[in-house]
Amino acid sequence: MIIVMKRSLFALSLLSILLFASFLPSEAFSGRSARMKEAFVEGEALVRFAPALSGASAQYVASSAGMSVAASFGALSEASGRQYLHLRSDSKSTREMIDELSKTPGVEVVEPNYIRSVRSTPDDPRFAEQWALRNSGQTGGTPGADIGATEAWAIRTDASGAVVAVLDTGVYYAHEDLAANMWDGSALGFPNHGWNFADDSDAPYDMFIHGTHCAGIIAAVGNNALGTAGAAWNARIMAVKILDDEGMGTSAMALAGYDWVLARKKHGVNVVAINASFGGSDPSDLEREAIAALGDAGVLFIAAAGNNNADNDRIPFYPASYNLPNIISVAASDHNDARASFSNFGATSVHIAAPGVDIVSTLPHFRPVGPAFFFDDMENGDAKWRKGRWNASAREFVPDAGTSWALAADAAFSPVHSWTSSPPSAKGSYHGIATYVDIDLTSVAETHCALNMRAMYSISEGNWMDIYYSKDGGATWSYMGGKGAADSEGEWEELSFYIPPSFRTNTFRFGIGLEIASDAPGNFVRIDDVRASAIETDSAYGKMSGTSMAAPHVAGAAALLAAAYPSESVEQRRERILHTVDRLEAWNGAVSTSGRLNLAKAVRRSFGGSGCSVGGAYPFALLLAAPFLFLRKK
């Protein structure tokens, strides 16, 4: 399993399908509310009136109670001599509707509008970990703090006609859980799956993992007995690589990506949304114009709000902060529906929250092949290593033999020794190890290679295990990924970290550090069997955090809604998403809707509105593409 990000893990339970029920008095409803929440349409109720009430009288009762008639059942009413109505309220919960109607003269039976489905919970084995889609409290969070995916899927799962363009680091399109959902343009004379603007080729292949993770959140194949499920089970993913293998790009690459998608749209490809999990602080007139043109062509633009814990109303982050009618800017929520500590916010310029903490999704797995350029099983001492202190802000490693790291002869992966950080380091320390020998990677400059290792760790909240690379023999260091508290499982696992082309020099080095930022008496890291080698790629799954992970939940929702309501305009689809959020206290003043995405409400609700204020007029952005996945807490 690959994990190159910080903060992760979760699980889910199956949807409870309730049997038919008759009248539920308020005390019975209260006792069953947790169960009922899983399997009925919130804000709706079914009612049977007494024979004395005619259809007009029954509708008057409903109107007086602040409810509207969604449907009436004429044949049933005629056959029984009683009026049957399907009622809806935009201001009352189902519980409030039932409490009020059960006390209303002439109402004989009132009950929730239960969901009926042959199968609304997919058989994907890791669906149980996807708290963002179905939160039963399995990760210690709040049950129901999710996007209501299983309720939405009970209504609709088919999004096969919708295409989402993922503008990112590419997509590992051979992944077992993505291959069937990759867009194929060959019948129209286009490249099979998209385009690579980093290398100007028709192979938008992901070696950075970020784009693949986003693609799986949107449209990992659902109900295929493999891995995870995307928000839109069978939407199509168009891979547009505008960021290179180090996760970096330029405004020109972004514009090329926008232009390419727009051309496909004008050639009849049903691109309904772009997922843009990247950004920078500088505005660009041309980028704004390109995104506006995509909106005019019918494409929603879903943008991550950024991971700097900053107010985008004061410090805009682009492209999310352009004030355009087709943009939805997305902040990240956690499993308690709270704002993620890293997530940007903005009362007017950020529109909606979506799950973005510890999100499990698809990843490429880098499997070592051929001879190793570096290998150490820790059985020959520390000749290849130096102990020391990390200074992340200065990008330096300072050798210090007095740190707590040591070669230990216990709990190794194989056969005897491993590097270990024990005994625990004090709060405020940042100690670790780095290779002392240069590693020559020039022979794989034109192919692919990765750093693989076995690791065991226990890390509490606020602390981190980090991986650093150096291309110049240790003179400077670059942060490449790591592990956080939610990753800690206390067992040996395989970690893989891709080595980008710019680091494949003849003076490559790498290092590992344990950063103790909060009190943590039990924290430790053990490392064994470290290898740098050429790689092959296969399918894997892993967890990441960031607004990069929040935006794809909204992009997946947009695909499902485009399939369900194909005649709606971009503005109507955007309003449908923004006006059906779960409004939450934690998001008051943090996003313009004060709420978190609710896919179930968006799929089922008839909608009409005058729009949602997003506020703020912002200048355009020069795109300095740095995927949020690797923006850390510092």
Image (spheres, rainbow, N blue to C red):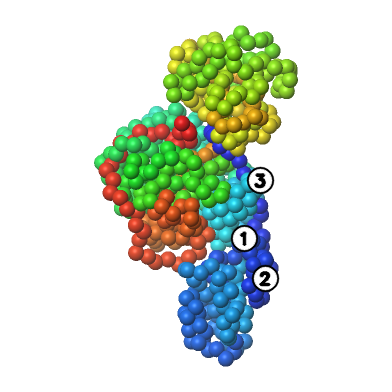
Identify the residue at horizontal 58%, vertical 11% (top origin).
401
- Tell me how far mark 1 sits from mark 3, CA to CA: 20 Å
Residue highlighted by disc 2: 28
Residue 131 vs 198, above or below: the answer is: below
Per the image, label 3 sits on a secondary structure element best described as loop
Q: Which mark is first along the chain, 3 or 1? A: 1
Tell me the kind of residue under disc 3.
Pro
Residue 229, percent from left and from top: 58, 48
Q: Which mark is first along the chain, 2 or 3? A: 2
Using the rendered view, name the quadrant where residue 201 is placed. top left
Per the image, label 1 sits on a secondary structure element best described as loop
The one of 48 and 573 positioned closer to us in this rendering: 48
Residue 127, percent from left and from top: 62, 47
Residue 628, percent from left and from top: 45, 37
Identify the residue at horizontal 34%, vertical 64% (top origin).
610
Residue 37 vs 184, above or below: the answer is: below
Identify the residue at horizontal 40%, vertical 30% (top origin).
248
The one of 268 and 626 positioned closer to us in this rendering: 626
Judge whether residue 1 can be spotted in this image.
no
Tag 3 and tag 2, C-beta contact below 8 Å: no
Tell me the kind of residue under disc 1.
Glu
Name the disc covering residue 192, or none: none
Per the image, label 2 sits on a secondary structure element best described as helix
Q: Point out the frontmost of discs 1 and 3.
A: 1
Side of 37 where 307 appears, left or right: left
Name the disc covering residue 125, or none: 3
Residue 63, percent from left and from top: 47, 79
